[in-house]
Amino acid sequence: MLASRQLRIHETQNTSFVVHVLSGPIIEDCKGIVFSDHYIDALSQSGWDRVQELMKKANLEGSPNKCHSVKDFKWHNVMLQSPNWSILSSEDSNKLLSQIIHAAT
């Protein structure tokens, strides 16, 4: 899980990112990248309520999440979705977050 202003990912394969990003993530030489943004509610429901406090401290509170606006620097066909990344469904995001939260406790 990550919250930041920018995110650049290079030479990465088969990896899931749970992110809040102010500008669209940039990927290069990547395959099988999955993005999810369904983390604030899941963390709050799990009892970890510091997420809002930390977002405020980082000046990210209330900012729009652009994790769906991925720029693939190796995919130049603007008419088609890059095959190198995808967005995780809400249901799969919740499963992933449950695993992360369980592993962290």
Image (tube, helix red, strand yellow):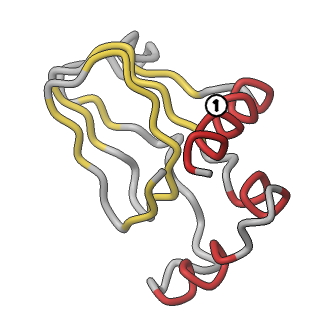
Q: Residue 104 or 95: which is nearer the viewer? A: 104
Q: Position of residue 21 (x, y in %)?
A: 45, 59
Q: Quadrant of residue 90?
A: top right
Which quadrant of the figure has residue 92? top right
Q: Is residue 43 left or right of residue 33?
A: right
Res 76 seen here:
no
Query: In terms of depth relative to the viewer, which is nearer, 64 or 52?
Result: 52
- Up-down relation of residue 67 to residue 86 (above or below): below
In the displayed structure, 92 sits above or below 57; it is above
Q: Position of residue 23 (x, y in %)?
A: 39, 59
Q: Residue at x 61, y 47 (%)?
A: 37
Q: Is residue 41 left or right of residue 86?
A: right
Q: Is residue 91 visible?
A: yes
Which image quadrant is residue 94 in?
top right
Q: Tell me the residue at 39%/23% (across/down).
A: 33
Neighbourhood count class around disc 1 (C-alpha, 10 Å): few under 14, some 14–19, many 20 upward: some
Residue at the (36%, 68%) spot, across then down: 5
| In-front residue for pair 17/81 | 17
User: Toward the viewer: 20 or 101?
Assistant: 101
**Relative to 94, is 14 above or below?**
above
Instruction: Report the residue at 62% width, 51% height from top.
Output: 105
**Which residue carries the number 1 mark?**
96
Q: Is residue 94 above or below residue 74?
A: below
Q: Amino acid at mark 1?
A: Leu
Q: Residue furthest right?
A: 45
Q: Position of residue 75 (x, y in %)?
A: 25, 19
Q: Secondary structure at mark 1?
A: helix
Spot the residue most to the front: 105
Q: Is residue 81 left or right of residue 13?
A: right
